[in-house]
Amino acid sequence: ALIPGLVGAAPIQNIGAYGTEVAESIVWVEAWDRLARGTVRLARDECGFGYRDSLFKRDPERWIVTAVEFRLSRTAPLRLDYSGVREELAVMGATAPTAPQVAEAVRRLRRRKLPDPAVIGNAGSFFKNPVIDAIAAERLREAYPDAPVFPAGLALSKLSAAWLIERCGWRGHREGDAGIAAQHALVLVNHGHASGAQLVALARRVAESVQQRFGVRLEPEPRIVGARF
């Protein structure tokens, strides 16, 4: 809900938000293999899906996604435990929420928290939420009790990149036309005429400050063309 992009980009990024990701609904992805010079159809388990990741993203010069088949359920369980969803549904008066009502609640939350790409240039969340060793995450929470920490599999924990960036003082920061959104520290924005190089340079400084303060490495979520992060 309210994620910018096209169908062909969805499996590349394995787009997701509010407790779900597109890989859960994909049956197969058809792609042009530039190495073999032919079309291939890859089942979901062959796509190497991970957190905001896929084999298409890891080898971008090889694959061009041409089609995706989805399997959708009419009775899929609703994801209501993500922060703010139940509260927003209550405000909407949705005591027995339906899937369209949950989607609308997510759209309302995202409109309040994230800048609209149609109004100010941005690519949505710029950094992945880092996944680290659970013991290291617990040490971080001991030092910073308000740090959001979520389970992320066996002996792993996921941190909030937005919280890390905001604690380093970057939220609302602006250098010329390159900046960090005032609404959400995870979003890089272009206020008008910032170049790609200026935005990447700002993102690098943000990541370096988080590394220095917390010892946590941030990785970009969108694919960066023409530069290394």
Image (cartoon, grey):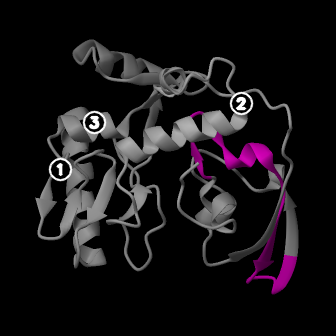
Q: Which residue is mark 3?
A: 164
Task: Identify the disc placed on residue 172.
Answer: 1
Considering every residue shown, the one lying at the far front of the view is 93
Query: Which range is magenta?
Result: 15-39
**Discs 3, 1 touching: Cβ within 8 Å:** no
Q: CA distance from mark 3 to mark 2?
A: 34 Å
Decide if residue 71 is in sight here. Answer: yes
First in sequence, mark 3 or 2: give its number: 2
Q: Is residue 200 magenta?
A: no
Q: Nearer the viewer, residue 166 or 90?
A: 90
Compared with residue 126, is residue 79 higher up or lower down, i.e. above or below? above
- Quick one: label 1, few (<14), some, or many (20+) residues within 10 Å? some
Task: Identify the disc placed on residue 161.
Answer: none
On the image, the x and y values in percent for residue 81 come to 57, 21
Is residue 36 toward the left or the right of residue 80 in the image? right
Is residue 203 toward the left or the right of residue 153 in the image? left
Front position among marks 3 and 1: 1
Q: Amino acid at mark 1?
A: Gly
Compared with residue 70, is residue 104 higher up or lower down, i.e. above or below? above
